[in-house]
Image (cartoon, grey):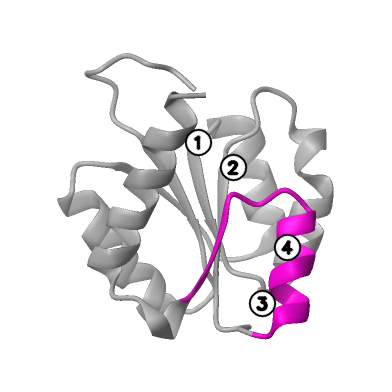
Amino acid sequence: MNNQKDKRLKVLIAEDDVFILEMYLVKFSTDGFEVLTASNGEETLKKIKEEKPDVVLLDLLMPKMDGWGVLSKIEECGGEKPIIIVLTNLGDKKNIDKALSMGVDDYLIKSFFTPEEIVLKMKKIVEKQKQK
C-alpha cells in the first residue's frame, strides 16, 4: 500500500444489491475515498486486477461468481493484495471461520453496522496494516 499522505484510499465496493451499493458509494465518497463499484464477482476480480484498490468490501452472495470465488482467485490478480473486508449478511461461525482462513482482514455482518461504523472500522484496519 502506498503511504503518501495525500493519496486518497481507493475502495472497491463489491455488492449486487443496488440500494446497498449506492448507500455505501455515497458514504465512502462523502468521506473522501476514491470509490469503485462492482456488482458481481467477475467484475470484482477485473477491477482488482486493473484498478489496484487499497481496500475491497466484498459481499459473499453475488451473481456470476460469488465472494468465495473471488477470494479463491484474488492471488491471480497480481500486484499487492488489497485489504479484504467481507461485508455480508452470512453471520454463522462456519462462514466467518472459512473467510478468515482464506486471508480476509475482517468479516462484518451488514445488519450489525451502520455505513458510518463500517467506514470507521475500515480506517482502523488500514491504519493497522500501515503499521506492519
Residue 102: image location, x then y, percent: 78, 53
Residue that numbered label 3 is attached to: 61
Q: Amino acid at mark 3?
A: Leu
Residue 99, compared with residue 112, is above or below; it is above
Q: Nearer the viewer, mark 4 or mark 1?
A: 4
In the rendered structure, which disc, 2 or 4, sits on the residue that comes first in sequence?
Answer: 2
Going by the image, does 116 lie left or right of 4? left
Q: Amino acid at mark 2?
A: Lys
Residue 12: image location, x then y, percent: 47, 48
Asked whether 111 or 38 is in front, the reply is 111
Residue 102, compared with residue 129, is above or below; it is below
Going by the image, does 64 lie left or right of 46? right
Asked whether 122 or 27 is in front, the reply is 122
| x 48%, y 32%: residue | 129
Residue that numbered label 2 is attached to: 47
Going by the image, does 96 lie left or right of 124? right
